[in-house]
Image: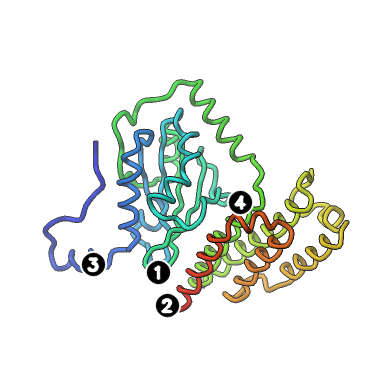
């Protein structure tokens, strides 16, 4: 069995300088490799994104691909939140990533307190049977490969796993999941604004406004047969509360398409405010998480 790469014991002065200024995320990546490689269900760990290309900065994500034996993937997905919370102290439950492309598995985003800010962890779980195609498609760097990693699950197991992934992707998000989504998208948006990436910020604000819409529809019309923006005024506007929510949503949609940080913060606060009114159970279930998230945002502002 191979092990994570450790820094060399003897370094030249130049290497010492490079090691001293290595991205802080490498320490988190090493801890992830150590924890996940101890799980017998995991067969491969691969890194992608800026850490793989050597272009990471303080705000960069940790993008890790975790290949899991096909028959054990559903169970690991079900226990992933508990593993990430107890082992790494993640701030929120994992958000099922709807932005990442379909690579034959499922993506999850976690926010991890690290060096007085929230580090974004992008974990992509895929069946071991799909890891070869994934590697050919996106070219991640292999960090670790476990024993028996080349063993292939039988066709029935592969089919059942694929069906389970499809079912999980089709489950509708409730208001609690949507609040987690809003906080994760808000964290992404603030990072892009800090980097001056206006085009990406525009897209993330749109996603955040769509989350506001989904909170309203999910809370007030939970059995709606419509999606997106279709029939929204007709469905939601039947009650005084619904019409008031639509006023808030209209305000969100008429705000600047590329916000500043204050406007991004207001977009999140609008969602929490609406949810507190129309889905109080969801806010109550995440009271500690919402407070902790706000505290970290304030801490980051103080350090900026």
What label does residue 220 carry, if any?
none
Front: mark 2 or 3: 2
Q: Position of residue 219 (x, y in %)?
A: 74, 53
Q: Nearer the viewer, residue 287 or 193?
A: 287
Disc marking residue 177: 4
Left/right placement of residue 223 relative to residue 262 reads right
Are the residues tagged 2 and 1 within 8 Å (C-beta)? Answer: yes
Relative to 246, 295 lies left or right = left
48 versus 147 height, above or below = below
Q: What element carries label 3?
A: helix
Pick the residue in front: 45 or 37.
37
Residue at 69% in and 58% down: 280
Q: Is mark 2 on a helix, strand or loop?
A: helix
How far apart in space, not on screen, are marks 3 and 1 (Cα)? 19 Å
Query: Could you tell me which secondary element the residue under label 4 belongs to?
Result: helix
Q: Does 291 appear above or below 97?
A: below
**Alpha carbons under labels 2 and 4: distance apart:** 30 Å
Judged by depth in the image, the label closer to the viewer, 3 or 4, is: 4
Image height of 293 relative to 97, above or below: below
Residue 20: mark:
3
Of the image marks 2 and 4, the number of the one nearer the N terminus: 4
Describe the element under mark 1 as helix, strand or loop.
Answer: loop
Determine whether label 2 and label 4 are within 8 Å by CB: no
Crowdedness of circle 3 by 10 Å Cα count: few (<14), some, many (20+)? Answer: few
Q: Which of marks 1 and 4 is nearer the N terminus?
A: 1
Residue tagged 1: 116
């Amino acid at each position: 069995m191979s092990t994570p790469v450790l820094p060399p014991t003897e370094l030249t002065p130049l290497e010492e300088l490079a090691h001293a200024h290595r991205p802080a995320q490498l320490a988190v990546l090493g801890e992830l490799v150590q924890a996940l490689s101890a799980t017998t269900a995991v067969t491969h760990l691969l890194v992608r994104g800026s850490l793989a290309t050597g272009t990471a900065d303080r705000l960069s994500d940790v993008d890790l691909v975790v290949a899991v034996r096909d028959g054990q993937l559903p169970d690991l997905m079900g226990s992933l939140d508990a593993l990430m919370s107890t082992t790494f102290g993640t701030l929120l439950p994992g958000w099922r990533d709807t932005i990442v492309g379909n690579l034959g598995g499922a993506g999850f985003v976690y926010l991890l307190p690290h060096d007085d800010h929230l580090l974004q962890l992008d974990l992509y779980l895929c069946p071991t049977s799909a890891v070869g195609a994934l590697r050919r498609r996106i070219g991640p760097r292999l960090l670790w490969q476990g024993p028996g990693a080349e063993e292939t699950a039988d066709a029935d197991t592969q089919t059942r796993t694929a069906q389970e992934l499809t079912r999980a992707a089709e489950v509708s998000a409730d208001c609690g999941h949507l609040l987690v989504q809003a906080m994760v998208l808000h964290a992404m948006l603030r990072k892009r604004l800090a980097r001056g990436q206006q085009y990406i910020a525009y897209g993330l604000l749109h996603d955040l406004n769509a989350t506001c819409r989904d909170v309203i529809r999910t809370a007030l019309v939970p059995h709606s047969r419509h999606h997106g923006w279709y029939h929204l005024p007709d469905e939601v506007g039947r009650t005084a509360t619904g019409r008031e929510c639509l006023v808030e949503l209209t305000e969100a949609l008429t705000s600047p398409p590329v916000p500043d940080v204050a406007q991004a913060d207001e977009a999140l606060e609008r969602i929490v405010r609406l949810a507190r009114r129309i889905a109080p159970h969801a806010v109550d279930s995440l009271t500690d998480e919402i407070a902790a998230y706000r505290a970290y945002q304030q801490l980051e502002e103080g350090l900026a």
